[in-house]
Amino acid sequence: MVKKNESFKPKQESKKERKRWSSWGLIGALVAVALAVVVAVTVSLMTASKIGSLINSNNKSCQCPSSQDSGKYKGVIEDCCCDYESVDSVNGEVLHPLLQELVTTPFFRYFKVKLWCDCPFWPDDGMCRLRDCSVCECPENEFPEPLKKPFLYGLPADDVTCQEGNPQAAVDRTLDSRAFKGWIETDNPWTNDDETDNDEMTYVNLLLNPERYTGYVGPSARRIWDAVYSENCPKYPSGEMCQEKKVLYKLISGLHSSISIHIAVDYLLDESTNKWGQNPELMFDRVLRYPDRVRNLYFTFLFVLRAVAKAADYLEQAEYDTGNHTEDLETQSLVRQLLHNPKLQAACPLPFDEAKLWQGQSGPELKQQIQKQFRNISALMDCVGCEKCRLWGKLQVLGLGTALKILFSVDGQNQPSESLQLQRNEVIALVNLLNRLSESIKYVCEQGPSIEKTMERQISDPSETKYAST
């Protein structure tokens, strides 16, 4: 960011000389004027310094100190077409505020998901310690009346009557056919769930079911990620991994980093008092101490951002109709701002170049192989033994699968093929995933350097006071 140094010059006012001045009086007046000028210049320079400091301070509040302080994340992001500094800047100034507003609109806050599926790989033995692990379903007799008449009302306002004193666990199962106006039912070849099958689907209000720490720990949780990496997304030695497999690994690693960051940011610090807050030690242990995990987070963010940009024409023409005309117009306006923001286009016109992949004779076969691996990762989400974790796992894997679907549905051109069709749930997952990644980038950007410094001091000197856990 270019800093402008403003120079402040005092205004010098000319005075009419009086005709009758004595020589000593004239000298005294000149001395007084000279002293006044010196004082004015000094005060002006001090004022300029203070204002400049204030301006710089305000600018720094919107910038990330990571690249300046640690020097680890500078230059072009590997396999992408943008640099870290530009991503941090445009995310803080443009993307994060837009996405935060967009995901609260009625269209983007309701997600259709099948939470009750048998694990296809092993018996589900996952147990959660906390009630926050579950997704609450409200009894029919506790639903507000508008929810029982979906064809007469738009999507309802949030209701807390059936949340058992825990708003974060509530579910909204509104079925409103108007929310599907202009959208088709189509399956995603990159994911395991049949998105056209509405049996046992439930509607979840994502705002009332935040991604956070749930107490889902132990062998069951570890087995999920072990299966993801070892069987479906192995990290080969650098010389043995082709570009396409490298992309898959980095996408999963980046998603994993983002999930870990959100758990650390919204963590149960004291179960006895139900006190929640940030756990910087966990963020350091899971993500920040491994630079490749941070880099993969940035990569995944740009990959998904590229998919949104590539589908701009499709997304701009889509109907975001939920029955609430005022909010639907606001949703359309926010989507257009996201797709056509000049700052974003100037800072990062091509976040990721997907045209480099699937080249050569083995391209189609390799694509099928990686598509199968990603479907297996999608199927593993049914093995997550925690409902809320399963909800966010399914949503974000569907969002990533939608990005893959958009970027690799091409006809030899740099535009989506005419046959590309997205269903409502895919678009909701895609935008919410981009928001999750944007939040994670912002956390790393703003808090990462200070956390790293503190934790590194503790490692070098164990007597250092640790972060307070309360």
Image (tube, helix red, strand yellow):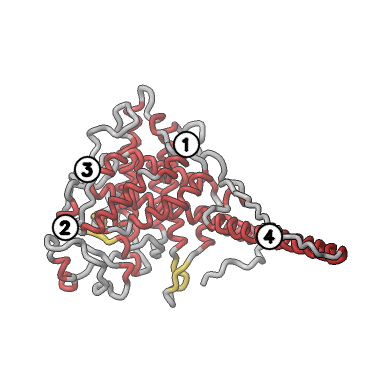
> Number of numbered discs present?
4
Q: Secondary structure at mark 1?
A: loop
Residue 449 numbered mark, or none: none
Q: Secondary structure at mark 2?
A: loop
Q: Are marks 1 and 4 in contact (CB under 8 Å)?
A: no
Q: Is residue 76 visible?
A: yes
- Foreground pick, 442 / 321: 321
Between the C-alphas of marks 1 and 4, the distance is 44 Å
Which numbered mark, 1 or 4, is in the foreground of this view? 4
Alpha carbon distance from label 2 to label 3: 20 Å
Front-most of 291 and 439? 439
Q: Secondary structure at mark 3?
A: loop
- Which residue carries the number 1 mark? 81
- Residue at the top extreme? 361
Label whose residue precedes the other's in the sequence (2 or 3) = 2
Residue visible at 58% across and 53% down in the picture = 65
Q: Horizontal and vertical percent for residue 204?
A: 26, 60
**Contact between labelled residues 3 and 2, with CB atoms less than 8 Å apart:** no
Name the residue tied to disc 3: 187
* SS label for mark 4: helix
Assess disc 2: are there few (<14), some (14-19) or many (≥20) residues with their C-alpha within 10 Å of its C-alpha: some
Q: Earlier in the sequence, mark 1 or mark 2?
A: 1
Judging by the rendered image, the residue that carries numbered circle 2 is 176
> Which residue is at 51% across, 41% downward?
83
Would you place residue 379 above or below residue 27 in this image?
Answer: above
How packed mark 3 is, by other alpha carbons closer than 10 Å (few <14, some 14-19, many 20 or more), is some
